[in-house]
């Protein structure tokens, strides 16, 4: 299988979302979109569990309208081992989405997995 194209900084690797990211119950974006704290920031709707159809509709909308849509992963989980992009654990998602196809108007979305949010319970090496 061909590895998803990616680009990186010194600490993060950015890659495009893949269909597996939306599959239940273990897909990264499936779990992110169904997290209550993340949903509060992503939608103006009431917070509720999402169906497979709703997540698929979201993915379709993103793939058709987003100017930028990517998942970011932490390069080093603390063990110092180099991993292939497909083996890195996703830490969050970001998007730049056009507003009504107007020139130079967009929204910016950023969602960080609860596991990677800054917390006094996480060791510093896991902070993004």
Image: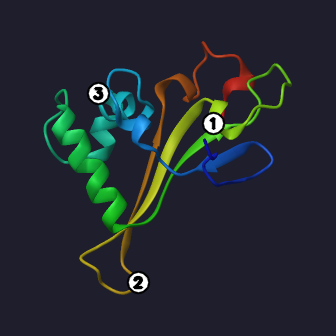
| Disc 3 target residue | 36
Residue beneath the point at 19% across and 26% down: 49
Instruction: Please name whichever residue, 83 or 39, is drawn nearer the observer in this view of the structure.
Output: 83
Q: Circle 1 — which element?
A: helix
| Disc 2 target residue | 104
Image location of residue 8, percent across then percent down: 73, 52
Density class for disc 1 (Cα within 10 Å; few <14, some 14-19, many ≥20) is some
With 61 as the anchor, is 82 left or right in this view? Answer: right
Image location of residue 27, percent across then percent down: 41, 29
Image location of residue 30, percent across then percent down: 34, 32
Q: Residue 43 bears which disc, if any?
A: none
Say if 75 sits above or below 70 in the image: above
Quick one: quadrant of the C terminus? top right
With 84 as the anchor, is 79 left or right in this view? Answer: right
Q: Circle 3 — which element?
A: helix
Residue beneath the point at 44% across and 31% down: 28
Name of the residue lying farthest toward the top: 121
Residue beneath the point at 61% across and 17% down: 120
Image location of residue 17, percent across then percent down: 47, 47
Q: Is residue 64 visible?
A: yes
Q: Is residue 88 visible?
A: no
Which numbered disc flags the more N-terminal residue, 3 or 1?
Answer: 3
| Disc 1 target residue | 86
User: Marks 2 and 3: CB-CB under 8 Å?
Assistant: no
């Amino acid at each position: 299988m061909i590895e998803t194209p990616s680009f990186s900084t010194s600490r993060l690797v950015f890659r495009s979302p893949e269909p597996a990211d939306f599959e239940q119950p273990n897909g990264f974006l499936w779990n992110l979109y169904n997290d209550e704290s993340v949903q509060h920031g992503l939608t103006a709707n009431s917070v509720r569990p999402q169906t497979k159809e709703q997540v698929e509709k979201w993915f379709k909308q993103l793939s058709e309208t987003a100017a930028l849509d990517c998942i970011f992963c932490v390069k080093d989980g603390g063990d110092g081992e180099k991993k292939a992009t497909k083996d890195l654990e996703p830490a969050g998602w970001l998007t730049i989405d056009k507003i009504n196809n107007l020139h130079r108007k967009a929204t910016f979305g950023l969602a960080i997995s609860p596991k990677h949010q800054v917390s006094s319970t996480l060791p510093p090496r896991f902070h993004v």
